[in-house]
Image (spheres, grey):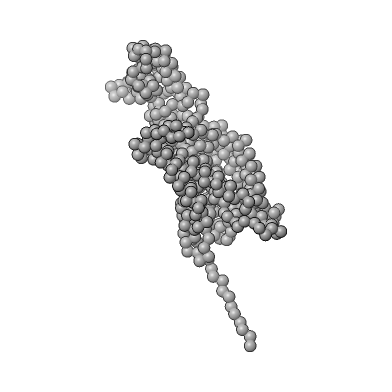
């Protein structure tokens, strides 16, 4: 008697809802990070703060702003390749150190990103309290730090369970926002080099590395498997690296998760943030700007990467799709608008005539009764950025020399205003700017 049996393969769902969640998380993180990164530029252009002396940038919350250079771009790709090879061979031995480093970094990111936001929503948390070692710190930062430490601790203990993925996503998103808020491109040249090299990096380590290492180095490292040592029997169990956005599959009978590396968010996100800085400094908005196109390009590129992974049944290097949909689109738009050379050389603060002047009341002193800075002939006075900055510095110096009397301060301000009446604010505008600079109506004795 002969028995025959048939085995049927159970098909996986074509598309899981987790892919949509990952797409939303990636796109929203990029857009939010760009908005946070240009808060200072918005204030400078509108006139609520002034550039620091010497052109050095420092965030309002004390975080330094780092402009990337060509050395950073090339060095990043070289160091990333070396670190990837190191992790590929020794990931199971050093994974615990990566996990601890991830917890510390994410706790710091949550504090720095959400502390100022919490203070804006609840001004009462802006008061400063004394903390051991750190002395006086904003109460909002203390609250966020305590919440971040608790969140990182819970994740560390439960990181191997399936239910803790929302905490990991919050921590990873905070890291992305922190990087986008402290690192930026100053010109499109560095941006083009870094993103192009990063795309080559992805292609090499996903598609070419199996020919050299007999394994997919990128996938093996991301999943925590690492290199297969044939003569080793005491390796610790595999653990996925935490620097990922993770969403568990909802309808797939085999389970599993959908992943998105933080590099696929941060690197294109730096370009999206750069595009928004261009719009802010040049006074662009909507279709006239770059930001809307960049966010849409990132969304399309990420959707293409997700669809490619579904169709090919394997992980895809997302930058292959993201770089053409963002960088190439940006360069095409800049070329059509004749701005490639300007953006290639770098950005400088330029206040468009349609925006609020740096100092209230600036304009031609012969303006009409409405005080709008318009002369009888209807022409608006134009002020260069150097003239505005020189005027304000002159007022501050004169006021400092005036010293102890309010009358001396007013005379110094009036003298400074009369030197370049056609290029500088009116006396009332100078006085108001002086008060804004010094934060007091009366001079200190």
* Residue 435, x across and y down, in percent: 36, 21
How many marks do you count on the picture?
0
- Identify the residue at image location x=50%, y=30%: 57
* Residue 355, x across and y down, in percent: 39, 31
Q: Nearer the viewer, residue 292 or 109?
A: 109
* Residue 164, x across and y down, in percent: 47, 54
- Identify the residue at image location x=65%, y=51%: 90
Apparent side of residue 63 relative to residue 208 in the rendered image (left or right): left
> Quarter of the image holding residue 381?
top left
* Residue 180, x across and y down, in percent: 50, 40
Could you tell me if residue 403 is visible in this image?
Answer: yes
**Residue farthest to the bottom?**
1
Q: Nearer the viewer, residue 85 or 382?
A: 85
**Residue farthest to the front?**
132
| Location of residue 308 with respect to 79 vertically, above or below | below
Location of the C terminus by quadrant is top left
| Location of residue 376 with respect to 128 vertically, above or below | above
Q: Nearer the viewer, residue 44 or 106?
A: 106
Location of the N terminus by quadrant is bottom right
- Identify the residue at image location x=51%, y=33%: 64
- Identify the residue at image location x=63%, y=51%: 93
Apparent side of residue 84 relative to residue 113 in the rendered image (left or right): right
Could you tell me if residue 13 is visible in this image?
Answer: no
| Location of residue 290 with respect to 207 vertically, above or below | above
Q: Nearer the viewer, residue 182 or 360?
A: 182
């Amino acid at each position: 008697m002969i028995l025959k049996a048939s085995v049927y393969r159970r098909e996986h769902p074509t598309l899981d809802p987790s892919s949509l969640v990952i797409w939303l998380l990636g796109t929203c993180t990029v857009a939010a990070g760009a908005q946070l990164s240009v808060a200072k530029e918005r204030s400078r252009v509108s006139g609520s703060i002034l550039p620091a002396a010497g052109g050095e940038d420092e965030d309002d919350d004390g975080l330094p702003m780092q402009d990337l250079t060509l050395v950073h771009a090339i060095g990043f790709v070289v160091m990333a390749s070396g670190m990837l090879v190191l992790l590929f061979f020794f990931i199971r031995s050093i994974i615990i150190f990566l996990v601890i480093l991830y917890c510390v970094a994410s706790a710091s990111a949550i504090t720095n990103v959400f502390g100022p936001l919490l203070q804006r929503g609840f001004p009462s948390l802006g008061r400063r309290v004394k903390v051991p070692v750190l002395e006086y710190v904003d109460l909002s930062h203390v609250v966020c730090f305590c919440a971040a430490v608790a969140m990182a601790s819970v994740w560390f203990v439960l990181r191997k369970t399936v239910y803790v993925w929302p905490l990991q996503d919050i921590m990873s998103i905070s890291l992305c926002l922190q990087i986008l808020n402290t690192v930026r491109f100053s010109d499109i040249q560095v941006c083009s080099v870094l993103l192009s090299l990063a795309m080559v990096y992805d292609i090499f380590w996903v598609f070419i590395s199996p020919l050299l290492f007999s394994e997919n180095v990128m996938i093996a490292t991301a999943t925590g498997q690492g290199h297969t040592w044939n003569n080793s029997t005491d390796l610790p169990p595999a653990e996925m690296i935490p620097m990922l956005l993770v969403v568990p599959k909802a309808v797939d009978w085999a389970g599993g998760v959908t992943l998105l590396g933080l590099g696929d968010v941060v690197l294109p996100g730096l370009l999206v943030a750069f595009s928004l800085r261009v719009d802010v400094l040049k006074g662009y908005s909507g279709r006239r700007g770059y930001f809307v196109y960049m966010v849409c390009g990132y969304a399309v590129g990420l959707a293409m990467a997700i669809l490619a992974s579904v169709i090919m049944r394997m992980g895809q290097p997302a930058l292959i799709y993201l770089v053409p949909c963002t960088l190439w689109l940006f360069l095409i738009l800049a070329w059509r608008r004749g701005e490639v050379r300007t953006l290639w050389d770098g950005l400088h603060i330029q206040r468009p005539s349609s925006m609020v002047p740096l100092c209230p009341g600036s304009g031609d002193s012969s303006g009409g009764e409405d005080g709008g800075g318009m002369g009888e002939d209807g022409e608006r006075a134009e002020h260069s950025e150097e003239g505005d900055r020189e005027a304000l510095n002159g007022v501050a110096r004169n006021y400092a020399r005036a010293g102890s009397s309010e009358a001396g301060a007013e005379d110094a301000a009036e003298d400074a205003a009369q030197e370049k009446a056609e290029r500088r604010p009116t006396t009332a505008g100078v006085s108001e700017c002086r008060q804004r600079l010094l934060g007091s109506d009366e001079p200190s004795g």
